[in-house]
Amino acid sequence: MTQPVFRFAPSPNGYLHLGHAYSALSNFDMARASGGRFLLRIEDIDTARCQPEYEAAIYQDLAWLGLTWEEPVRRQSEHLDGYRAALAKLEAQRLTFPSFESRSEIARMIADRDVRERWPRDPDGTPLYPGAARMMAEEERTVRIVRGEPYAIRLDVERAMEWAGPLRWTETGEGPSGERGEVAADPAAWGDVVLARKETPTSYHLSVVIDDARQGITDVIRGQDLFWSTSVHRLLQALLGLPAPNYRHHRLILDTEGRKLAKSTQATGLRELRAQGVTAGDIRKLVGL
C-alpha cells in the first residue's frame, strides 16, 4: 500500500493565525495516525506580498505547536521552470489564451449588464471574465505581446472541459453546503481562470496541482473555503495527466462575528497569542482538537 503523504502549504504573506493552526494540526495528526508523512510547502509565488520575516515566523509557529516536517521544505519560488513547462503543455494543446484587460477594464466591461441582470460570479463572488480576448485574432495577440503589453494567461475552460470530459472527486470531509461522497466537478463556475501573468509564470491553481503531484501528496486536507477550487484542480490534473489526491475539506475557524479568520482582516496571529502566554496545548483546545 502507498504510504499516505499529507502537506501544509501556507503563503508567507502574513503571520499564521488559528485557522492555519487548525489546518496544520489536522494534517499533522492524520499523518501521524496513519503512519504517513507530513510535508511543509511554502507557497511564495507572490513576490510582492511574501516576505522572509513571515516565512521565518511560519517555521517558528509550527515548531511551537509541536509539528515536525521533512526537509528540505519545497519553496515554490525555486521551481518556476516546472510551472512554465506545465503552462507550455497547455498552450501547445491550445487550451489557453492571453487576455490584456486590467481588472478595472473588466469591471467597466460588465458594469452595465451587471446592473440589469447581475453578471455571473465565481464561487468566491468575483465576476466571471467576459471572454473578450478569447476570440482575438492570433496576429493581434502576437503584436500586443511583442509590444510588451501586460497580460494574463487564461484557461479556455469550455475547450478544456470538452477535452477532459466529466470529472468528479471523492469528498471525505464536508463541503460548505454539506456535500459529501462523490462530487461532480464544475470548473465552468470559475470561468476562464488565470493560470499565469506576464510577470509571474504560475497561479495558485496551476502551482498547487503540480506541487501536489511532484511531492506525491495522497491526501489534501484544507478549509471549506477551497472546496469549489477543487473543480479547477481536477480539471488541471486531467489536462496535465496528474494524479488526483484524496480531498477532505474541514470547517473554518471563525471570529466572534462569524467571519473566516484571514490575514487581510488582521486576525490575531499565533505569535501574538504565544506572547500573551497561550500554550500550544491551549491552541489545540481553542480550535477543537
Image (spheres, rainbow, N blue to C red):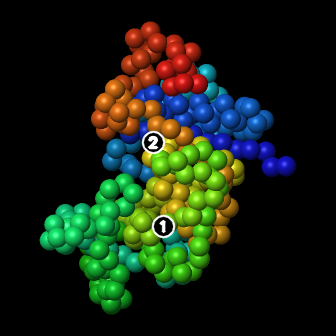
**Residue 93 at x, y percent in the picture:** 54, 81
Instruction: Give the secondary structure at mark 2.
Output: loop
Instruction: Give the secondary structure at mark 1.
Output: helix
Using a 10 Å C-alpha cutoff, classify the residue at mark 2 as few (fewer than 14 neighbours), some (14 to 19) or many (20 or more).
many
Label whose residue precedes the other's in the sequence (1 or 2): 2
**Residue 289 at x, y percent in the picture:** 58, 25
Q: Residue at (32%, 62%) from the top-left corner?
A: 121
**Residue 266 at x, y percent in the picture:** 31, 31
Q: Residue at (56%, 33%) from the top-left corner?
A: 24
Q: In the image shown, does 250 or 151 lie closer to the viewer?
A: 250
Q: Residue at (49%, 20%) from the top-left corner?
A: 286
Residue that badge 2 annotates: 11
The image shows residue 244, relative to residue 135, as above or below, that is: above
Which kind of residue does numbered mark 1 sit on? Pro
Which kind of residue does numbered mark 2 sit on? Ser
Q: CA distance from mark 1 to mark 2?
A: 24 Å
Q: In the image shown, does 55 or 97 lie closer to the viewer?
A: 97
Left or right for 84, reference 40: left
